[in-house]
Image (cartoon, rainbow, N blue to C red):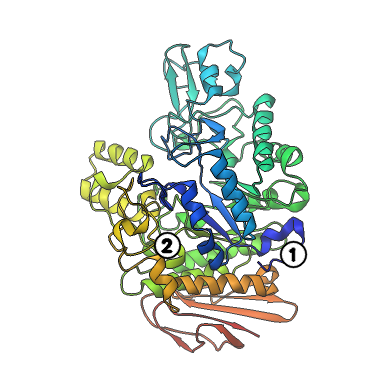
């Protein structure tokens, strides 16, 4: 790898690759991806050029929410392998010059975690205050908060006569971060993983750990992200665990504004390196609606939003850059064209993302243009969020056709179908029956075919990663949006030490005329005054 920045901020020149282990590669034929499967693909990832692997949770878990409900933070779920296999994966990753990041899920645990079992056993148990328990209010829930997975965010416990808070599934009780013993237990666990050799943490919904004092009712049942002690908790975590170790840290933060992110990622405040914003992911939702209430994306809205984040964090803090992850549908299907322009639109979105200011994240299969699942029946879906919403929407009288239309666009299962390694049975993912159906387009769209084709999405991503590793202007240049009102073209310039990188992409199904000429030598694509559908180019001057 050609990351030449100082040891503390090496991640600015890095590219992160997210692995969703359940769907990545299955080594033992049980239909579920596993840790040895990941290890078997390290050379493929090294050839792509990525620097960091981020693993979604492989901890011991009842798998109510696909591993984001953790019952033991310091053990591996047998579905995925063993601790020794995890240590081998870390070692093999390091041998190839890559780093490995664990998913840190500490807003909540599983209700089968030993901490919660103790906490629920009686009101006077020493761990009772490790979770958030409240008496009923007028015989019902303590407040009006709604779970992110539908229904109230409270579950009544018959044994002790109180409710516990669960912002997500009722099997995911929220930890009480007000309790210093909870915080120290989390920090001790993090230090243990660093001793195993991991290189940082992606922190799941980390800005929910500080709750509003008194847990007041929220507008529409919302549960107040970015609570009053957030910065205190993150600074304490940094001081106790993260400081001066050369780690990479990213906080997943729903409801986080540019102004919030400036505080969270300002190096002088010693909190996090970067955050995941959600704002651009909500631009195809009807105003005031849920994620399922669809509207077409306006490119001018996307440009305005990303420009605000680019400029807002340019002088203070750092951006994370992503289109895809395990919670989002595939970008080539969502905002691209996954039919006649699949390859071109996947390349165009990759070009726009990777050359902005920040650290890019690639989600498994994105690098060769995997598409949404194209499921047509409710029985094909597996995701808790999707199934809960479908049941709720059915109860409200929404037609099945409308429900399936929304799920086809937005379900998290779109990102979770098995990685399509080759054109063989089950796309080379497993020799058994996969836990979720393999996409039917795997004969055409797969990694083996992409690696063999020099014009593929895979080789384009490899080139984009190479540009970040070899051109300082990509890492540290300033950002200036071009032609903000153009409804087809996403174009911008990066500038550093007299050098200018210009990126122009036609993100539409129609040809587009450039408003003005673009100078410089072509370093990717073919500069022209008129671009075909989903065509993009990059120049350097």
In percent of width and height, residue 75 lies at 55, 34
Q: Quadrant of the C terminus?
A: bottom right
Q: Residue at x 70, y 68 (%)?
A: 476
Horizontally, residue 508 falls left or right of residue 494, namely left
CB within 8 Å, label 2 to label 1: no
Is label 2 in a helix, a strand or a loop?
helix
Is label 1 in a helix, a strand or a loop?
loop
- Return the residue at label 2: 331
- Return the residue at label 1: 5
> As displayed, is residue 500 above or below residue 133?
below
Horizontally, residue 399 falls left or right of residue 529, namely left
Residue 295 visible in this rendered orientation of the protein = yes
Q: Residue at x 49, y 22 (%)?
A: 164
Horizontally, residue 322 falls left or right of residue 31, namely right
In percent of width and height, residue 297 lies at 41, 63
In percent of width and height, residue 345 lies at 41, 72
> As displayed, is residue 128 above or below residue 323?
above
Q: Residue at x 45, y 46 (%)?
A: 34
Query: Which numbered disc, 2 or 1, marks the residue that appears first in the sequence?
Result: 1
> As displayed, is residue 225 above or below residue 259?
above
Residue 134 visible in this rendered orientation of the protein = no
Residue nearest the observer in this picture, 533 or 118? 118
Q: Quadrant of the N terminus?
A: bottom right
Horizontally, residue 337 falls left or right of residue 146, namely left
What whole-number distance in Å separates the C-alpha atoms at marks 2 and 1? 31 Å
Q: Alpha-carbon neighbours of circle 1 within 10 Å: few (<14), some, or many (≥20)? A: some
């Amino acid at each position: 790898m050609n990351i030449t920045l100082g040891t503390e901020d090496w991640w600015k020149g890095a590219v992160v690759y997210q692995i969703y282990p359940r769907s990545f590669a299955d080594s033992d034929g049980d239909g579920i991806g596993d840790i040895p499967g990941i290890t078997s693909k390290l050379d493929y990832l090294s050839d792509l050029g990525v620097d960091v692997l981020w693993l979604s949770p492989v901890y011991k878990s009842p798998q109510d929410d696909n591993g984001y409900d953790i019952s033991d933070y310091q053990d591996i779920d047998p579905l995925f392998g063993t601790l020794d296999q995890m240590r081998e994966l870390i070692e093999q990753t390091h041998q190839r010059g890559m780093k490995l990041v664990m998913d840190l899920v500490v807003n909540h645990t599983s209700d089968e975690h030993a901490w919660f079992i103790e906490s629920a056993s009686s009101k006077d148990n020493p761990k009772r205050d490790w979770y958030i328990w409240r008496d009923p209010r007028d015989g019902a829930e303590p407040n009006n908060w709604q779970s992110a997975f539908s229904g109230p965010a409270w579950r009544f416990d018959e044994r002790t006569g109180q409710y516990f808070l669960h912002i997500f599934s009722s099997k995911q009780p929220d930890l009480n971060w007000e309790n210093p013993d909870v915080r120290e237990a989390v920090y001790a666990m993090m230090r243990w993983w660093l001793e195993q050799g991991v290189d940082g943490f992606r922190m799941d919904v980390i800005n929910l750990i500080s709750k509003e004092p008194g847990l007041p009712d929220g507008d529409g049942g919302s549960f107040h992200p970015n609570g009053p002690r957030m910065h205190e908790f993150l600074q304490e975590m940094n001081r106790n665990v993260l400081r001066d170790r050369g780690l990479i840290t990213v906080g997943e933060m729903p409801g986080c504004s540019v102004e919030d992110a400036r505080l969270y990622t300002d190096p002088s405040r010693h909190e996090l390196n970067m955050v995941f914003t959600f704002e651009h992911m909500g631009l195809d939702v009807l105003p005031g609606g849920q994620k399922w209430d669809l509207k077409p994306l306006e490119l001018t809205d996307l440009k305005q939003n990303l420009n605000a984040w680019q400029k807002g964090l340019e002088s203070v803090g750092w951006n994370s850059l992503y289109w895809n992850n395990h919670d989002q549908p595939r970008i080539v299907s969502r905002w691209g064209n996954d039919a006649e322009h699949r390859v071109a639109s996947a390349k165009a979105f990759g070009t726009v993302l990777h050359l902005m200011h920040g650290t890019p994240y690639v989600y498994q299969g994105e690098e060769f243009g995997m598409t949404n699942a194209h499921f047509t029946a409710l029985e094909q879906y597996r995701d808790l969020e999707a199934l809960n919403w479908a049941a709720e929407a059915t109860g409200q009288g929404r037609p099945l056709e409308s429900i399936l239309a929304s799920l086809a666009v937005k379900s998290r299962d779109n990102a979770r179908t098995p990685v399509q390694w080759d054109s063989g049975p089950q796309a080379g993912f497993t020799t058994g029956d996969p836990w979720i159906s393999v996409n039917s387009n795997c004969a055409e769209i797969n990694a083996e075919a992409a690696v063999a084709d020099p014009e593929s999405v895979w080789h384009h991503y490899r080139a984009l990663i190479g540009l970040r590793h070899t051109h300082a202007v990509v890492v540290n240049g300033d950002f200036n949006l071009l032609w903000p009102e153009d409804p087809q073209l996403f174009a911008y310039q990066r500038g550093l030490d007299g050098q200018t990188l210009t990126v122009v992409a036609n993100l539409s199904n129609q040809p587009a005329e450039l408003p003005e000429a673009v100078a410089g030598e072509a370093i990717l694509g073919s500069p022209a005054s008129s671009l075909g559908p989903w065509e993009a180019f990059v120049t350097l001057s």
